[in-house]
Image (cartoon, coloured by chain):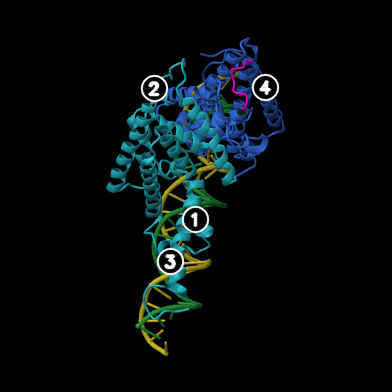
Chain colours: A cyan, B blue, C yellow, D green
Amino acid sequence: MSTTSGKTLGGRRAQAARNDEVILEAARAVFLDDPKAPIAAVAERAGVGISALYRRYAGKEDLLRQLCHDGLRRYVAEAETALDEPDDWAAFTGFLARVVDADVHSLTVHLAGTFTPTEEMGRDAMRAGELATALVDRAHASGRLRPDAVVHDLGLLLEACAAVRVPDPERTRQLRRRQLAVLLAGLSSVPDADPLPGPPPAAGEFDWRWRRRE
Amino acid sequence: MSTTSGKTLGGRRAQAARNDEVILEAARAVFLDDPKAPIAAVAERAGVGISALYRRYAGKEDLLRQLCHDGLRRYVAEAETALDEPDDWAAFTGFLARVVDADVHSLTVHLAGTFTPTEEMGRDAMRAGELATALVDRAHASGRLRPDAVVHDLGLLLEACAAVRVPDPERTRQLRRRQLAVLLAGLSSVPDADPLPGPPPAAGEFDWRWRRRE
DNA sequence: TAACAGTGGAACGGATTGTTCCGCTCTGCT
DNA sequence: AGCAGAGCGGAACAATCCGTTCCACTGTTA
């Protein structure tokens, strides 16, 4: 299976191209499960040698950064998709459901601090914040979101869902959906509800992970 | 400051007795923050040498086990206290608030798997389960808890609250209270609510941590 | 068939950490 | 007063883990 030159690659090249995918997928799975897993675990899971990894990424930090950036882009993409939805409340809940399903939170927040971020990531993170605010504003406008909920309550909510984790991934997804349902019910407007306690979560309070830890 | 013999200990003995407390407190603080912190971190935080630790505990595992067991007993004690409360719903919410404030969840579930448990811990864990069930039953009886909530939803709830963590402990407590308020609102009965999705959390699904991991 | 991209995996060096050990201090008792 | 030893600090040790490098090998491409 060889071509003299050009597009459809056979044999070795194809295998290499496929490895690009396999490795990224393995890395995602492994680091989602444990943010400080050894890099060898990724190679093992991908069914490749360590060289195959180092051929593609300068080091562990590089891999983590790319993974995290991908997650961030996914978050932005889902938010943009959601903003196309005409129904304000459905846009809000649909966005959250998709972000929770994709475990974007573990990919972004939980990986932060393990690498030095790029400028572009900073820009994307800012954009993510704006989009989230827009979604929350619309949810407020719909009257279905309780008035004392703020944008940064999303951080709490996503953290809560990401914290649910059992060995089986599919079961994890189900339980997270349940958790999300409870949280959304709790964030819904009801006639005579006690206001949420304490100063609401503020801007910088969840970014502390981004400032290098270990 | 010396006594010929007897009860009020002065000097060295007193210091040692005080260290018992100081060390346990330091261990609690350190391991709550990071379940796999090095044992030296505990000594440093307590302001003592490593010897002071090894004089009291056979090893790291011993310390962790004791810490976890203490947490378990605290859980049981709070549950028993709650069951004395006449108001069913107040008993339920009060229990959760105290358990969340004391961060009992991090002390028990998050430390499990780092040591081999004793039989007594097994018994206490079982008792904890019974008490929790009693509290949930009473909450159901009060009509304030949505009918499709089950005991093991408490596991989800506690996990969600324990997941909230910022550098400042007091602020962490505030944010957890807020999270708890949202979750309790979500678990409250409302006339025409969609049922919670998915198979509800079941008995063995959160005990998986107790079966040794790393 | 010669060069080489792509790879597997052993090997290395540095870092981390649980535990032991030794010497010191200060107490409690005679 | 003086001694035996409880209590302690912290260096030292051994084991482990992990990121990265390196080299031999394989199949492909030209």
Circle 3 residue: A17
Determine the residue positioned at 53% across, 59% down: A44
User: The numbered mark 4 sits on a residue in which chain?
Assistant: B
Q: Taken as a whole, is the magenta stretch helix, strand or loop?
A: loop
Q: Are marks 4 and 2 on the same chain?
A: no
> Which circle, 3 or 2, is nearer the viewer?
2
Circle 4: residue type: Leu
Q: Is residue A62 magenta?
A: no
Neighbour tally class for label 3: few under 14, some 14-19, many 20 plus, Cα within 10 Å: few
Circle 2 residue: A147
Q: Are marks 3 and 2 on the same chain?
A: yes
Whichever of callouts 3 and 2 sits on the residue coming sooner in the sequence is: 3
Whichever of callouts 2 and 1 sits on the residue coming sooner in the sequence is: 1
* Closer to us: B170 or B55: B170
Q: Give the percent coordinates (x, y) of residue A59.
A: 39, 57
| Distance between mark 3 and mark 1 Cα atoms | 15 Å
Circle 1 residue: A26
| Distance between mark 4 and mark 2 Cα atoms | 36 Å
Q: Check disc 2 and report its element: helix, strand or loop.
A: loop
User: The numbered mark 1 sits on a residue in which chain?
Assistant: A
Q: Are marks 3 and 1 on the same chain?
A: yes
Question: Is the C terminus of chain A in the top left, top right, bottom left or bottom right quadrant?
Answer: top left
Circle 3: residue type: Ala
